[in-house]
Image (spheres, grey):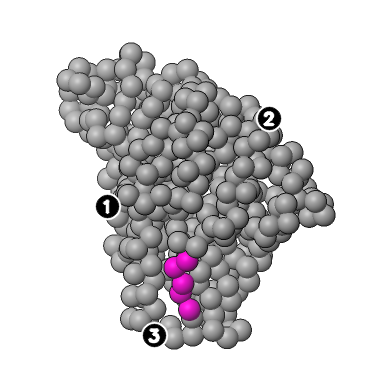
Amino acid sequence: MKRTILYDCQKKLNAKFVDFHGWELPLQFSGIIDEHKYTRNYAGLFDVSHMGEIFVQSKEQNNAAQNFLAKILTNDIVNIPNNKAVYTLMLNYNAGIIDDLIVYKFHSDKFLLIVNASNIKKDYNWLINIQNSENYKNIKISNVSDNYSLLALQGPKSKEIILSLCGKSSTELQNLPRFRFLEISLKNIPCLIATTGYTGEDGYEILIENQYAGEIYEVLIKNDFVKPAGLGARDTLRIEAGLMLYGNDIDETTNPLEANLYWTLKGNGYIGEDIIEKLKNNGINKKIIGIEMIDKGICRQGQKIFINNQECGIITSGTHSPTLNKAIGIGYININYAEINTEIFIDIRGALKKALITKLPFYKKS
């Protein structure tokens, strides 16, 4: 299995490791519930260096990178300002979701894609194939995933913590809106800092060269308001916030309308757009829903959903919510049964347990 550059440091912190798509990553340190609640109240520090980084750049100053990505990505990257990050999708020709990702626009000739760890090779190959088939000769596509580490500092104390480390750059960072990024220094170490995250809280993601990752991680972890957090808390936090996990809640068998990600479809001329227009006209067969358990039991991926003893859906993610103190889940259901407050039943170990369809997200920060 692959390991991030911070493995030894995390081992000293008594991390419990698991296999995540071929990566040996921390599941937890002090405990999933403890890390979850600490992130909601103070700040959790996540090592997400397994994520992929792909640069797309023009070989000349001619907007070639922007024109290329406008075909690849569903969201509008043409009309956004420089130093803006955008959540977007990459679709195949059938409008299935190849990946969901964050694109960072430096300017019209330079973009960075942060992609899911399990999709790095697939995404890179897709980009290269489209470049070759559509004859985009004036761009350079670089998979630099092995060169960078990515840290996520998430929670209400994260801003105070980051500002204490960035010296002269603190004024610039002080009022940085959500989904913006800056290239600044932390402790005199060059970083790309973005106001993005995957927890439903305010926070920062810090992209840094591998050689400096340990130093920044150590500085952050020494702060009294920071706890190291693992994949377990990251999962419970993102489910509460109604955020999708690729491979669970979305994949190439689902489309953006089914996944309630229609708001990412702001671009023009992207691959799959023709199918999206047909789906808008003809309708979809299933829809993603939030689920709150009424009976005792925790819903998990793969469990079936029933109404009137008829199977009509499936759970894609589920957990016990430490914030709400209830069992919650995400799943897909036949479009005819997708109304909020509809009573459903989940097959948990052969027993049908009562639940309720509810809105996503389950949690919004105060």
Residue 346 screen position, x and y as percent:
26, 24
Q: Secondary structure at mark 2?
A: loop
Disc 1 packing (10 Å; few <14; some 14–19; many ≥20): few
Disc 3 packing (10 Å; few <14; some 14–19; many ≥20): few
Residue 126 screen position, x and y as percent:
34, 69
Disc 2 packing (10 Å; few <14; some 14–19; many ≥20): few
Q: Which residue is mark 2?
A: 224
Q: Amino acid at mark 1?
A: Thr
Q: Which residues are magenta?
A: 140-144
Q: Is residue 116 above or below residue 131?
A: above
Task: Place residue 335 in its image quadrant.
Answer: top left
For the C terminus, the image quarter is top right
Q: Is residue 209 above or below residue 302?
A: below
Q: Are marks 2 and 1 in contact (CB under 8 Å)?
A: no
Q: Write the residue at 54% across / 52% down.
A: 150
Q: Which residue is mark 1?
A: 253
By secondary structure, the bulk of the magenta-drawn segment is best described as strand
**Mark earlier in primary sequence (1, 3):** 3
In this view, the mark in front (2 or 1) = 2
Q: Which residue is mark 3?
A: 135
Q: Tell me if residue 95 is in the magenta stretch.
A: no
Q: Are marks 1 and 3 in contact (CB under 8 Å)?
A: no
Q: Is residue 174 above or below residue 337?
A: below
Q: Are marks 2 and 3 in contact (CB under 8 Å)?
A: no
Q: Amino acid at mark 3?
A: Asn
Q: Write the residue at 55% across / 25% down.
A: 37
In this view, the mark in front (1 or 3) = 3
Q: Is residue 11 visible?
A: yes
Q: Is residue 268 visible?
A: no
Q: Secondary structure at mark 3?
A: loop
